[in-house]
Image (cartoon, grey):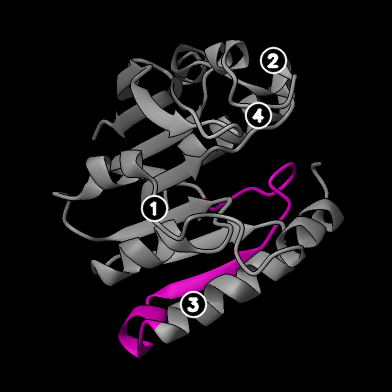
Amino acid sequence: MFTREFWDERYGSAERIWSGNPNPHLVDTVTDVVPATALDVGSGEGADAIWLAARGWQVTGVDISGVALQRAAERATEQGADIADRLTWQQVDVMSWDPAPARYDLVSAQFMHLPRPALRALHRRLAAAVRPGGTLLIVGHHPSDLDTSMGRPDRADLMFTAEQVAATLDPNEWDITAATPPRQATDPEGRTITIHDAVLRATRRH
């Protein structure tokens, strides 16, 4: 499930995989922030990147799946040239890819789940890509979701807490907020249940 082939096949299996709406923790984090440069990691079908671009951000969206990136680019074009021109799409393997250091004012990784050593290494590389004064936003499925009827893969090693992400950051360099907010979701049986996200927001000090 960590290969380009896996994700190309998944995205190719349906006209749309995700809702098309921006992730709510991203919206909460940056709605009142002055637009600048952003990196959207695991950009998928482009909802987050397009939402940012529509608000004036210059956005680089990266994903392992060329199918997803093509779909994202098409949807950005449908929104108009003023939005599409603010977007750059790159196909990368996040297991080995390293973004440029201190390049972005916002680095967002939403629901990127990798084996623990690879995930820690990725989080360190993403943190290094944040400029002084910039924000790192990492959101994932909390391990407590395994105890719900949500139907998550039975892979506790792929889930993480916000505190585990925070442990990869130097507290002398970052103002860090780690939280586990609840939200309502619909399980595969159509029932409304409460799940929890792991949410790490950190601002690099000047």
Secondary structure of the residue carrying numbered label 1: strand
Residue at the (43%, 85%) spot, across then down? 78
Q: Which residue is label 2 attached to?
A: 156
Viewer-closest of 170 and 180: 180
Question: How far apart are labels 1 and 2 at the CA level?
Answer: 31 Å
Q: Which residue is label 3 attached to?
A: 75
Assess whether mark 3 and mark 4 are in contact (beta carbons under 8 angstroms): no
Viewer-closest of 34 and 68: 68
x and y percent of residue 63 in the render?
A: 64, 57
Q: How many marks?
A: 4
Q: Which residue is label 4 attached to?
A: 119
Question: How far apart are labels 3 and 2 at the CA level?
Answer: 34 Å
Residue at the (59%, 26%) spot, across then down? 150
Query: Is-magenta flag for residue 81?
Result: yes
Secondary structure of the residue carrying numbered label 3: helix
Observer-side mark, 1 or 3, equals 3
Q: Residue furthest right?
A: 5
Q: Earlier in the sequence, mark 2 or mark 4?
A: 4
